[in-house]
Image: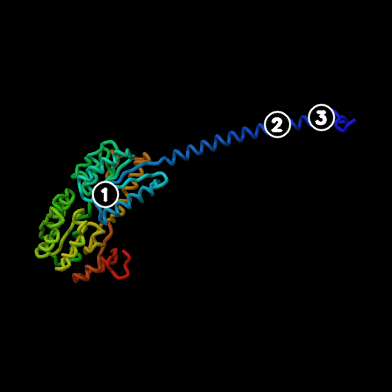
Amino acid sequence: MSEKEHRSPSTLITAAVTAVAVLVVGVAMYFVGEHSVKKTTGQTATTAQTQTVKKVGILQTMSHPALDQIHQGVIDGLKKGGYVEGKNLEVTSMNGEGDQSKLATMSQQLVNKKPDALCGIATGATQALANTTKDIPIMLGAVTDPVAAGVVKDLKHPGGNITGVSNVPPLKAQLELARKLLPKAKSVGFLYNSDEVNAKSQVKHADAIAKKMGLETKRFAVPTSNEIAQTVQIMSDQVDFIFIPNDNAIANAMPTVTQEANKKHEPVIVAADTMVKQGALATIAPSQYDFGLKTGEMMADVLSGKSKTATTPVYVFNGGDVYINKKEADLNGITVPDSVMKNAKVVGEEGSNK
C-alpha cells in the first residue's frame, strides 16, 4: 500500500477542515477588498466635489498702479478664501484701457462664459458688468461711490446681485494731513476728471470740508488727459497746493501731474497711496492692495455660499496709513513734523524699499 492509502480517518478530517478554513479566509478577504474599493471610490468622489472648479471673470477699467494692485489683491483674496488658480479656480481677466465701449463688449464676453461670479475693478468696469447681467454675482473691486454710480441701492442693503468694497477716501483726514504739512497754506485746488462721477462726488465733499477748515477752494475739472499738464500749470499759480481724489484718469497721468507741479514746487496731496509712490507729496489711506484683498475674500464667500450679494453690506475701510514722499518734501522745502513722520510709511527716501 502507498503512503496515501495508509492515512487515518482523523488525518483526512483535519485536511478537510483546513481546506474549508482557507476558503472562508479567501472569501472574507474578497469582501474586505470589495468594501475597501467602494470606500476609496467614495472618498475620491467626495474629493472631486470639494475640488469643483469655480469660474470668475475680472474686468478692469484701465491699467495704472492703483488698479493693478487691486487686481492682484483680488486674486490673493480668493486664494485666502480657498480658491486657487489651477486647482479649483479659473480666472478670466480683461482690461478695457479706459474705453467704455470696450468695457461693454468685454462684459458681454465675460458673461457669455457663464462664470460663477464677476468682479469690476473701478467704476467704469462695474457699471458695464451691471448693465450686462442682473443674475450673476458681481463684486465691487473698489468703487468710491457705488450709490452715485447707480450700481447699488444702499451701502448697507445692496438688494441685488452686486456688493463688494468701496474705496471712498478719508477726505477729512487727508486735508488735515495737508494742513500739518503745509501750515501756511491758505488755498487748495481740486484736480479731477469732469466725466468721472466718483471724482465729482469726492470733490464736492472735500470742498465743503476744506472751507470749514478755513481754506479757499477752487475746482479744476479736465475732460481729457490732454489738458492735464496745462491745468496743473495754471493751478500752481493760483493755489497753495493741489488735491487729487480717487480718479482713474488723473491717476493714469500722475507722472505728468508731478512733473508739471515740481516745476513750480507745488505740493500735491492725493487720495491713494500709489499716487504718492508716483510723485505726490502725501496721503493717508488704506493701501490699494488691501481694497483688492478684501474684495477677493468677499467673492470667495459668495462662491462658497457663505454669503449673498443682496444681503451683504458694501465694505468701507476706516482710516488708513500715512504715506510721505520724502523726495518730494525735500524738493519743495517742506519739513515733515516728527509727529507725522514717526508713524508714516516713507517713500522716495534713500534706502527705502517702498
Residue type at the position of mark 1: Asn
Q: Looking at the image, do the residues carrying marks 1 and 2 touch, with CB atoms under 8 Å apart?
A: no
Measure the C-alpha gap from mark 1 to mark 3.
86 Å
Residue tagged by mark 1?
Answer: 95
Left or right: residue 31 compared with residue 289: right
Residue at (29%, 63%) from the top-left corner?
345
Determine whether 154 is above or below 178 in the image: above
Residue 329 vs residue 87, the one in the foreground: 87
Left or right: residue 354 compared with residue 53: left
Q: Quadrant of the C terminus?
A: bottom left
Q: Mark 2: which secondary structure?
A: helix
Left or right: residue 225 compared with residue 306: left
Q: Earlier in the sequence, mark 1 or mark 2?
A: 2
Residue tagged by mark 2?
Answer: 23
Q: Which mark is residue 12?
A: 3
Residue type at the position of mark 3: Leu
Measure the C-alpha gap from mark 3 to mark 2.
17 Å
Q: Looking at the image, do the residues carrying marks 3 and 2 touch, with CB atoms under 8 Å apart?
A: no
Q: Earlier in the sequence, mark 1 or mark 3?
A: 3
Determine whether 21 is above or below 165 in the image: above
